[in-house]
Amino acid sequence: MEIPGEPRLIGVVSVEAPGELDAFFKSAVWLQGFSIHVTTVFTPLRAYEDFAATVGDRLGEESNISLVECVPRTGLHYFLTFTVEYEGMTQEDLFRIWREEAKAALDAKKSGTVLDLWKVVAQRKVFAIVCVSKPGDLDAISFDLPIMKKMGDKVHITCKSLRQADDWIKEVRRETYNAIKVMGLLYFFESTAKLNEQGYVHSCLSLYNALKGSRSLSIREIWKIPGEHKLIGVISVDSPGELDSWVASSYEHLVNGISTVFTPLRPYEDFAANVGDWLEEDTNISLVHCVPKNGLHYFLTFTVEYEGMTQEDLFKVWFEEGKAALGAKKSGIVRDLWKVVAQRKVFAIVCVEKPGDLDKISFELPVMKKMGDKVQITCKSIRQADDWMREVREIEKEQFRMSSSRLSTAENR
């Protein structure tokens, strides 16, 4: 599989002996011809069915688990990593929940929702490739799994958007293929410029122009991190493959050494409505339009844990928090906010009059009052990329004017 918009391929290989991995790279003549550096990391895995059978054996239960064949289907693909802790639980408690979880996971594999999944050897970690109709389905999965319902406060999930590498290769070779199109897929992007012959500013400037000039990307937000060589923002595409199309056609990425990381998002309103549905609360949540205002802008990341709480406790607090957050969006304090797909993480762009207002917000939000000890916040100062762009152009004009003036003076002499 290929990670859209990033120069990375991931997958699972089978070998008869570990030495075959070394033999492969030693004989890979195609790598020696590249001027770019290729790094590969291998993680030992075992079939999830085999692990599930082992858990059953440890519990003294009869298990008749065989290899499950998945029936692939069309949709959006994601790579999920589940990291499981069990502080305060016995090992037997963990095994009983994991046994129930394994049954649900293998049923999902039979249905085609899970293409495949593997247990990382000697670690409490599981890799899974899933296929869903829309990004919001991943949150439904992440909250509805038995392991998430019973000990979700001890499970951490990371998520990456994927696409079939074969489709990507066909696109590179300019062959036709059927792309999966889902209108309005949202991605957060973070682009970091590297020093080139013309400097960091020129590199960032080139990236800005590439984003603004793209026909495949619809820019929702684009911001500059002051004092750093980074642009961040939110874009909308019709299919994950459009991220690859943009990067492949971007001279800035190929020549200026710009690296971009994409994170799949969903509208916060959509997530808030889902939380209400899970609680069986009457919800009438629609897309909230913010009225932008002048002030200091910041990019906040909220990472939510809920150790010692039930999933229902978390939902009740998050439902109340959702109302407050969307109310702040209506008022203009929150310019916009998004839920990271499949993770307990929220991104928000806020506008305040002075830095101290951020501390006030961070202490008065419902989620901070009721479970603030379980919420981690990171903060970055940001400014409108358009404003930064205008300043850079004015500086360039002034430098050109001064250079022309000096040249004219020298000629007159």
Image: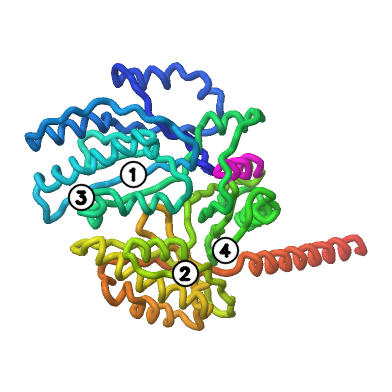
Nearest to viewer (mark 2 / mark 4): 2
Precedes in sequence: disc 4 or disc 3: 3
**Which residue has dot 3 on it?**
85
Q: Are marks 2 and 1 in contact (CB under 8 Å)?
A: no
Q: Secondary structure at mark 2?
A: loop
Q: Residue furthest right?
A: 412
Q: Amino acid at mark 2?
A: Ile
Q: Is residue 190 visible?
A: no
Q: Secondary structure at mark 3?
A: loop
Name the spot of residue 127 as percent of width and height, x first: 33, 39
**Which residue has dot 2 on it?**
285
**Which residue has dot 4 on it?**
224
Nearest to viewer (mark 3 / mark 2): 2
Q: Amino acid at mark 3?
A: Glu
Name the spot of residue 275 as percent of width and height, x first: 36, 63
Report the span colored magenta: 239-250
In the figure, is residue 64 to the left or right of 247?
left
* Quarter assignment of residue 169: top right
Q: Are marks 3 and 1 in contact (CB under 8 Å)?
A: no
Q: Residues within 10 Å of mark 2 (few under 14, many from 20)?
A: some
Q: Are marks 3 and 2 in contact (CB under 8 Å)?
A: no
In the figure, is residue 323 to the left or right of 64?
right
Q: Is residue 295 visible?
A: yes
- Residue drawn at (61%, 48%), measured in percent from left and top? 196
Name the spot of residue 247 as percent of width and height, x first: 60, 43
Give the spatial CA distance, label 3 vs label 2. Answer: 35 Å
Q: Amino acid at mark 1?
A: Thr
Q: Amino acid at mark 4?
A: Lys
